[in-house]
Image (cartoon, rainbow, N blue to C red):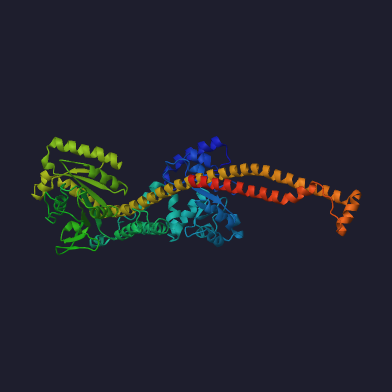
């Protein structure tokens, strides 16, 4: 929308346009040259001509609302490689060149002028141009700006031709309404991640899901490069921790669903696992039975071995384990520091967390603390309230309501899934009383369905990426705050230096005046001495002085001249001492201040 219009009219038009664009979720609303109105209307950004205000200023106006999750879009029109580099460094989201000026521009030079590997997109402005040759023109750029009708016709050409260019799947789809996009997505109903367990079930990876998986992998790989380069100690202050998490996430995209069981000692985690797998796989008891992290995977032969990282791997021929790897963890209230670390390391990798609580003591202090830790990784959590056989029906409802209220507050979710069960009754084959049927269905639905399994895997990878990005933002925020503090110190010191210089200059001027007066006195004395020596009345004395027969009579000015050197040295030394004393005192002040 054009910013040259009346401000009120532009504001009203922007509000109406936002309403119309609800049908086109992929299209941002940008105003031309008016970041103030764009910010007021909550538009996604602005386009700026070469004569408009600087990119930095526009971004500052658009970023005044800190509650916005997404950064504002600032597209700047450029006409040279120098302008492209300058605006890229100032934070432009994209650069725009006019179609009519393409003959005079070197696009490759414009792209190479941007520093770093993460160069910003370059768009072409197609306003007022015909369709002839535009599709080929677009292909040389990262996007296009222009009349919606023209853009849609170009997009339809790509749709019809099924072109494999970058515009074939992105540029043209952005011009489809939400309903049109949904209709296109229905063409392929078999979209899921092609993990090894899923392939065994005979599924075929759909193109859309495979493309999404590749996009996630590219995004995580790029994030890993950024973390390795700029923030290697992002997690726990340990070098390489964040990078290792990303590597695990990339590997996990091709593995079975990871179901992690957490909770306090004696909450019945091992019993819940045995009930889910319908077998007494893990030992249970009133003393801690799980002192290490145990991974339970599918295997034709039951066996158990310790791995290099200290965790145990238990293989067992359970049908459920063909799609899921179950992780049993030590109790949140009895683990050693090493065991706590092992448990926490699995949370970022988890696709689904079963938080097991004991019905007779739900949500203890250690459980609420651990829930807060899980929250930062945005994990899908299912609450299992075990040992419901210890409570009456009313007490079970009361405990469930208590868990729901508190977990909602901690996790920030409205309806956390809560399943009161009795692993003991389930293992005794009292299925109607155990309540396990609902839990089993929930776990199977989340991990066993093709679409749900893909969604869970993708969500885990994306959640990890989002959590690391949030951590990066927080680190940047902390560093920015530190830089602002340092800048304030530098500004204060700079101000003090200027004040100190003024005061020193003022005092120095007084000393310089004293020296100048001394010099003036010497000059006057020298002139008087010269006049006295060379006067006609003193001719006899001069002749005697020259031939050596007598000494010339010297006036009092000669004494002033002879004493000037020592006086000047004294003044210079005093000035030097004054300089050293004041400068040292000022340096001492700066040392104390810093």
Asked where in the image residue 502 lies, by quadrant, the reply is: top right
In the image, residue 335 lies at what x, y percent? 21, 51
Q: Position of residue 339 (x, y in %)?
A: 23, 54
- State whether residue 95 appears in this view: no
Give left or right: position of 406 versus 435: right
Coordinates of residue 38 in the picture (x, y in percent): 50, 41
Res. 147 in view = yes
Of 167 and 583, nearer the camera is 583
**Residue drawn where x is 49% and y is 51% of the image:** 93
Q: Residue furthest front?
A: 549
Question: Closest to the observer: 160 or 24?
Answer: 24
Residue at 41% over, 49% down:
473
Query: Where does the image place residue 587, in percent across and percent down from the top left?
Result: 53, 48
Compared with 139, 180 (above or below) is above
| Left or right of 261 in this view: 209 | right
Q: Name the residue rendered at 24%, 39% in the picture.
A: 404
Of 204 and 529, which appears nearest the observer? 529
Total labels drawn = 0
């Amino acid at each position: 929308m054009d910013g040259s219009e009346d401000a009120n009219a532009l504001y009203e038009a922007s509000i109406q346009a936002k309403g119309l664009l609800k049908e086109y979720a992929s299209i941002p609303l940008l105003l031309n040259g008016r970041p103030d109105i764009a910010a007021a209307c909550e538009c996604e950004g602005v386009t700026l001509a070469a004569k408009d205000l600087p990119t930095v200023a526009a971004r500052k106006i658009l970023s005044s609302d800190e509650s916005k999750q997404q950064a504002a879009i600032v597209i700047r029109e450029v006409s040279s490689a120098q302008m492209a580099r300058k605006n890229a460094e100032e934070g432009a989201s994209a650069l725009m060149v006019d179609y009519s000026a393409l003959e005079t521009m070197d696009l490759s030079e414009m792209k190479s002028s941007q520093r770093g590997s993460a160069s910003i997109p370059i768009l072409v402005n197609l306003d007022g141009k015909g369709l002839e040759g535009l599709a080929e023109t677009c292909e040389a750029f990262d996007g296009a700006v222009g009349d919606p009708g023209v853009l849609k016709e170009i997009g339809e050409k790509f749709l019809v031709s099924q072109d494999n260019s970058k515009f074939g799947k992105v540029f043209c789809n952005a011009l489809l309404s939400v309903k049109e996009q949904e209709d296109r997505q229905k063409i392929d109903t078999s979209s899921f991640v092609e993990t090894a367990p899923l392939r065994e079930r005979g599924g075929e990876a759909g193109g859309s899901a495979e493309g999404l998986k590749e996009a996630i992998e590219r995004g995580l790989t790029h994030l890993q490069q950024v973390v390795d380069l700029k923030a290697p100690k992002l997690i726990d202050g340990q070098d390489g921790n964040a990078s290792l998490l990303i590597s695990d996430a990339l590997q996990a995209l091709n593995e079975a669903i990871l179901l992690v069981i957490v909770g306090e000692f004696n909450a019945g985690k091992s019993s819940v696992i045995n009930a889910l797998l319908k077998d007494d796989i893990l030992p249970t008891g009133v003393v801690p039975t799980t002192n290490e992290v145990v991974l339970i995977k599918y295997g034709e032969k039951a066996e158990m071995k310790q791995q290099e990282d200290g965790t145990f791997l238990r293989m067992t021929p359970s049908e459920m384990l063909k799609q899921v790897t179950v992780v049993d963890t030590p109790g949140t209230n009895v683990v050693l520091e090493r065991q706590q670390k092992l448990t926490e390391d699995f949370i970022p990798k988890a696709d689904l967390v079963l938080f097991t609580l004991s019905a007779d003591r739900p949500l203890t202090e250690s459980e609420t603390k651990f829930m807060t830790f899980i929250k930062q990784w945005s994990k899908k959590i299912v609450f299992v309230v075990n040992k419901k056989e210890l409570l009456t029906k009313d007490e079970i409802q009361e405990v469930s309501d208590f868990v729901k209220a508190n977990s909602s507050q901690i996790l920030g979710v409205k309806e956390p899934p809560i399943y009161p069960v009795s692993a003991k009754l389930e293992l005794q084959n009292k299925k109607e009383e155990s309540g396990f049927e609902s839990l089993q269905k929930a776990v199977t639905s989340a991990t066993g369905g093709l679409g749900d399994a893909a969604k869970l895997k993708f969500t885990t990878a994306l959640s990890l990426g989002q959590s690391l990005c949030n951590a990066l933002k927080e680190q940047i925020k902390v560093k920015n705050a530190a830089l602002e503090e340092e800048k304030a110190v530098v500004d204060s010191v700079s101000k003090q230096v200027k004040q100190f210089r003024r005061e020193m200059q003022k005092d120095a001027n007084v000393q310089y005046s004293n020296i100048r007066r001394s010099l003036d006195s010497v000059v006057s004395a020298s002139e008087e001495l010269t006049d006295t020596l060379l006067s006609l009345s003193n001719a006899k004395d001069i002749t005697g002085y020259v031939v050596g027969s007598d000494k010339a009579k010297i006036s009092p000015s000669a004494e002033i001249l002879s004493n000037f050197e020592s006086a000047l040295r004294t003044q210079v030394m005093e000035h030097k001492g004054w300089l050293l004393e004041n400068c040292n005192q000022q340096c001492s002040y700066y040392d104390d201040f810093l």
